[in-house]
Image: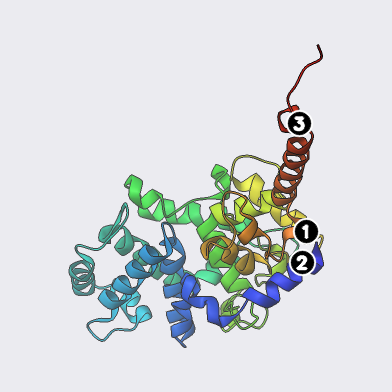
Amino acid sequence: MRSFLDRLYERYHREEFLYSDPLEFPRRYRAPLDQEAVALVSALLAYGNVKQIRRSIEELLARITRDGLTPSGFVRSLALPEGKTRARAALSGFVHRFNRGEDLLLLLELLGRSWKEHGSLGAHLMVALEPSAGDFSIALARLIADWRGWAGSRTPSFSHLLTSPADGSCCKRWCMLLRWMGREDGLDLGLWGERGALRAGFPEGRWLRASQLVIPLDTHVGRISHYLGLRTRKTLDWRAAREVTDALRAFCSEDPVRYDFALARLGILDLCQRKFQPEVCGGCELLSACRFARKRIRIGQKCQSSSVRSPKNAVSGSSP
């Protein structure tokens, strides 16, 4: 399995495929807090189809920066009444599926408060992330609880942005954000990692380790992980995300989510479909490891063999 996953990683974990991923957007910026702010909104708006996600993030960034502000400057401006008034006008009319401009305004206000109290969103997370923790679930649940408390009453659409492991959610979008921030390999940003640009503001001895990451379990990775025998749970919840992560840990204990970007490309680029198609599946890197494809091949072979032996194919006749 590892040899198949490694080949998949080499083929798809590349910059040339960033056009199909929201990670493209924070990588446009150089200032760490600009990257952190854009990464947050890009990850949390990453639901729906790729074209819709890209269109919404592009529109949001254009609205945020149209008055000459950087993304981090826009966030900081929300602390002033006149800045919040301008920001509300800038985001008026923004829609991404069932999220509205007011949801994004509140989200960025919460980010600004984390910056004010902790220096960065990463530093806020580190308050509860013990170096010995197996994953970031406790720290993320604590951060989400803080934000829910700061936000007060919330609309259902805004609550959709603040999913928590404590609720059993797979937290796909937050897991994706933390993958971007905890890994650094040419694609992922690594801002909260050991050598991350924001680590200087973290509590002593704390940073986000790649070994603490959990797979972002979207529909694509969820389906493909089932095909590969990495997941047995039917529901795509937090326990399923942990199950897939633990299975991948057997192939790379220090960096179990390194294969996430590549696995997701199979689904996003429609290279792995929901039904077996020999012309598609036959050229897949994971064919020999895919239980779904092997099962369909065996069924096809059995049906073909049965058809050959069927009496219907024999010469008709009867004994006198």
Q: Element under label 1?
A: helix
Q: Element under label 3?
A: loop
Q: Nearer the viewer, mark 1 or mark 2?
A: 1
Return the x and y of residue 101 as percentages of the image width and height: 26, 61
Distance, label 1 to label 2, CA atoms, is 8 Å
- Front in this rendered view, residue 132 or 232: 232
Three-letter amino acid code at disc 1?
Ser
Three-letter amino acid code at disc 3?
Ala
The C terminus sits in image quarter? top right
In this rendering, the answer to whether 121 lies above or below 232 is below
Q: With 195 as the anchor, is 20 left or right in this view?
A: left
Return the x and y of residue 140 as percentages of the image width and height: 57, 57
Q: Nearer the viewer, mark 3 or mark 1?
A: 3
Earlier sequence position, callout 3 versus callout 2? 2
Q: With 64 as the anchor, is 207 left or right in this view?
A: right
Q: Nearer the viewer, mark 3 or mark 2?
A: 3
Mark 1 in CB contact with mark 2 (< 8 angstroms): yes
Q: With 281 as the anchor, is 167 left or right in this view?
A: left
- Front in this rendered view, residue 292 or 254: 292
Mark 2: few, some, or many residues within 10 Å (few <14, many ≥20)? some
Earlier sequence position, callout 1 versus callout 2? 2
Distance, label 3 to label 1, CA atoms, is 36 Å
Q: Disc number at residue 314? A: 3
Return the x and y of residue 52 as percentages of the image width and height: 36, 63
For mark 2, what is the residue? 4
Three-letter amino acid code at disc 2?
Phe
For mark 1, what is the residue? 288
Q: Residue at x 60, y 80 (%)?
A: 14
